[in-house]
Amino acid sequence: MLMWHSIHIWPIIRYCLWTAFMSDAPQRNVLPAWKLLASRARRFLLGWQDFRVPSCSDADVLFISRPVYAQALPSGVLFDRIVDPLHSSLPGGRCAEKFYVSPWPLGAMLQFPAKVMRAANVHDVEVPPEHVKAIARIAEIVGLDASSLQSRYALALQQFAGWLETGNRLLAGRPCVKVIYLPSWYFPDMMGLTAAARQRGISVVEVQHGKQGRYQAMYSGWTRIPEGPIGYLAMPDQFWCWGEPSRRHILATSPSRVVHVPFVGGFPWLDYYRQNIAPATRAGDIGSQKFHRRVLVTTQPRVAVNPEPVPNFIVDFLRDMSMRNQAHDIHFTFRCHPNDKAGPDYVRERLADIPPARYSIDPGDANLYDQLLAATHHITAFSSCCYEATAFGVPTLLFGDAARSIYADEISSGEFAWTPGEVAVLDAWLQSAPVDRPVACEPYIESSLDQARRVMERLM
């Protein structure tokens, strides 16, 4: 196996392969060498400061997350749907700190205070010659451009090194930390922080943030985990899963693993919302007034398997609504993915010839569950929001070949409807899709704050 400073780096290579295949660029050439140099020069010219370690603390639990998971509560306060329910369920006597790996919106208030981390400045990380050669060979095998994959890997290794140093500096002043909870482990920032923690014997638990199906390459298909209790230092010790299907998918190709083990902890944000927020939530104008059918469309960024986030059949349906005398009966809300900053402009351009009264655009910062309470129907390509819609009794229509593969079991059971992209199917589904339909397959999401509390006590 390839090593860098005694760390197995296959997870980083696998991340580079996954992002390359998910890219919609024809040559998948994301960052040539000249752009790497330009990026470093820009940091120097702007006076990029090195990471300053926050003051030491006696915290025994760290929560690390990304602002993209923050949801606005009715009060306007931002609540992190991944780690804040765990923070709220922390067993008595525990001291916790919370960090983000990038800044949250300026001026926003957080439910639980947090500090911002950033990658430490490290000297240019040279890619070992054997890595260059191996990545060229991998690129040849899988049909990618070798120089593009090598550039992608060079950037990822540089980022990993910076975040590894950040983790080392941070944890050096926190000798009491026993466990770290974080989401989306498979980016270089979280990998670096994970490796720094595990080198110190600190347990790292990755908390599920979305669907983890049998085709999600950073969770499924791990067949050659190094023997012993360490495995890959850059991977979490354990995976906190929403339910049994996710746990089963992770274990499918390595059921006897002794490290990087998944377990069912549930998705406590759903239970937190039901207990603490839903009773006081009032549906907005779209959800409470004149529209009989209120369709929430959760879009995703444009990638190779999702070339048109607002597909043609939805545009055609909206364009033809007047002809079907439905203009005053149906309203569409397009919720852009929080990571897709270009999403709102894309939707406006895509729907330029559609009367504005027929739809609304949410840039992704509204509370998803508030929107599901106001919706009667939900449409997506393959967002895991479909499972959350089920939890609120809202039927989902999936579209496209990717969704047909990813959600084959749920489509077969009748939990989700599916179309290749036909206006007639959408029209018929809106007319007949039942709410609170029986679900044949096992629930994908479990949700209990009490269960989360018990799990956290065990992990300490």
Image: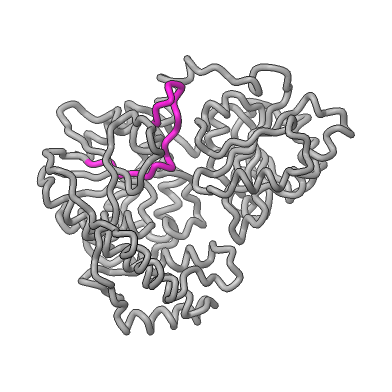
Residue drawn at (30%, 28%), measured in percent from left and top? 88
Residue drawn at (28%, 69%), measured in percent from left and top? 8
Q: Is residue 188 magenta?
A: no
Quarter of the figure with residue 36: bottom left
Asked if residue 180 lies left or right of residue 137, the reply is: left
324 to 303, vertically: above or below? above
Residue drawn at (61%, 70%), measured in percent from left and top? 26
Looking at the picture, how far across and down is residue 19, in whole percent? 48, 63
Q: Is residue 64 magenta?
A: yes
Quarter of the figure with residue 395: top right
351 to 30, vertically: above or below? above
Q: What are the residue bounds of the magenta stretch?
A: 62-78
Closer to the camera in the image, 306 or 123: 123
Looking at the picture, how far across and down is residue 139, in whole percent? 48, 78
Quarter of the image where the N terminus is located = bottom left
Looking at the picture, how far across and down is residue 452, in whole percent? 32, 32
Looking at the picture, how far across and down is residue 420, in whole percent? 73, 51
